[in-house]
Structure formats: C-alpha cells, structure tokens
Image: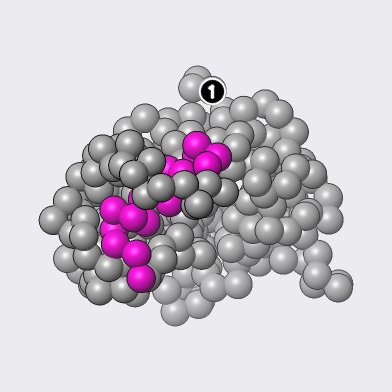
C-alpha cells in the first residue's frame, strides 16, 4: 500500500441548514492522480474549498502528510506543499509568460517584497522560469503577454506558475473547463507529465479525461461519497450510471 498523503475524515460543511458536504472521508495516495467527479451540485468544489482552507468545515478532520491541517490557514497549507491551481487565475495579464513564472518563483523564495531592488536581481530566476516554461510547452511564448495567449496556453501558464511553488500535492479545479479538443489533449498530456513525481487531485466534468488520467475516482452525489475506485469499476456501478443519467450527464 502506498502511503496516504492527504486524508479527510467525516468532512462536513453546512450552510445555514443546507448540508453541502456530508461525512466525506477521502484517502489520497501519494503519487496518484485522484479525480473527484459527480453531477452539478454534488459538492466537489466545496470539498476543494475545504481542502484549501477557503472554508472551515462544520465538523471533520483534514490531514496532510499526517499533520492535522483542519484549522490551518491557506498560506500555511501552501507552505506545507499543497497548492491549488485554476480556480483563481494565477496569471497577470500584462506580464509576459516568463515574468509570470518569475513572480511565482519569487513567492517561493519569499522575496515578494523586494520589488524595489534593481531588475537585475530577478535575472537569476530566469533560468528556472525558462525550464518551467519548457516543461509546459511554452518556450516559444516566453516574451508574449499572458493576455495574448490562447485559452489553453493560458491554462498551461497557470500550471507553470503552480509548479514554481514546488507543490507535493497539486489541486486542479476543472482544468479542462472551456477547452476545445486539441487543448484538452495537450493539457491531459501536461497533467500526466507533472504528476510523475507528485500527487494530483482534480475536479473534472470531462469523463473521457477522467477515464484516461485518473488512478482512482471518488464519485460525489448530494455531498456524499456514492462510489470510489478505478474508472473501470466506478463507471459500471449502477448507482453512478443512475446519478449521471438522472442529471443529463453520461458516464
């Protein structure tokens, strides 16, 4: 059994009487790609918000690498090695692709407040920033302003800025949302690549992507875990088929 890097126990979130997440216990294995899926309103984004401390649970526990992070602050979580991408764009439109990655590298170095220093001190970060851009296939766009990048490439830049923070656990919130076929293929390839030596937890609607990428899948319905396991097993589960068919999705 590989070690569990992220774990929740009886995670529950109530909003004035409405239970959005109910008794969710997850065990995310180190080095795996774990997908959270489910019909709209199933509680996937709320779970992500709880994991990344945008919300505090009504009850339950969250552990990262064995340490209880239930009451930790968002900044502490990032420092401990869990970083979320996509939900809030990490990209500054007026900066070039290289400059965007450099800003993220500065955050890692904790030199964010040294903007008054001469520009030349940032040059040392250029090599690492170039490596990260190469890793996500953006070398040709290093001097392009982020705002001018096509949608899929902007998403690749977000992955590069997330990687600059050197996460051990990377949370991807609907990485394929709004993408065309070609971008989906490229991004799936990229996720597989960046997952090579880290753990990836993703919320995703695109079932084909989930089928091809995930080692393990947790299906949520009305805030509770409906099924869990590898795609082949989960996709044959009658309750899962019912949940998706009933909401106009197709598993």
The spot of residue 158 in percent (x, y) is: 38, 57
Q: Quadrant of residue 220?
A: bottom right
Q: How is the image coloured?
A: one colour
Which residue reaches farthest right? 17
Against 12, residue 168 (above or below) is above
Magenta segment, prevailing SS (helix, strand or loop): helix
The residue lying furthest to the top in this view is 1
Which residue is nearer to you in this view: 40 or 202? 202
Residue 176 in the image: x percent, y percent? Answer: 34, 64
The magenta stretch spans which residues?
A: 94-112
Identify which residue is drawn at 50% across, 37% down: 109
Return the residue at label 1.
Answer: 3
Given residues 52 and 226, the one toward you in this image is 52
Give the residue displayed 54% in from the left and 23% down from the top: 3
Seen in the picture, residue 123 relative to 211 is either above or below; the reply is above
Q: Residue furthest left?
A: 140
């Amino acid at each position: 059994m590989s070690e569990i890097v992220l774990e929740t126990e009886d995670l529950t979130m109530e909003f004035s009487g409405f239970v959005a997440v109910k008794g969710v216990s997850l065990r995310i294995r180190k080095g795996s790609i774990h997908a959270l899926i489910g019909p709209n309103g199933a509680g996937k984004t709320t779970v992500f918000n709880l994991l990344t401390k945008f919300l505090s649970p009504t009850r339950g526990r969250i552990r990262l690498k064995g340490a209880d992070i239930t009451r930790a602050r968002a900044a502490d979580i990032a420092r401990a090695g869990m970083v979320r991408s996509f939900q809030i764009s990490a990209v500054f439109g007026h900066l070039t692709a290289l400059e965007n990655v450099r800003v993220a590298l500065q955050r890692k170095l904790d030199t964010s407040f040294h903007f008054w220093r001469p520009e030349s001190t940032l040059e040392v970060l250029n090599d690492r920033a170039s490596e990260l851009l190469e890793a996500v296939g953006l070398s040709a766009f290093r001097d392009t302003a982020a705002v001018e990048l096509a949608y899929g490439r902007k998403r690749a830049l977000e992955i590069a800025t997330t990687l600059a923070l050197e996460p051990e656990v990377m949370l991807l919130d609907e990485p394929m949302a709004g993408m065309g076929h070609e971008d989906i293929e490229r991004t799936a390839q990229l996720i597989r690549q960046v997952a090579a030596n880290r753990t990836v937890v993703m919320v995703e609607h695109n079932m084909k992507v989930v089928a091809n990428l995930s080692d393990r899948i947790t299906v949520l319905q009305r805030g509770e875990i409906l099924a869990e396991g590898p795609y082949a097993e989960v996709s044959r589960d009658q309750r899962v088929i019912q949940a998706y068919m009933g909401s106009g999705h197709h598993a």
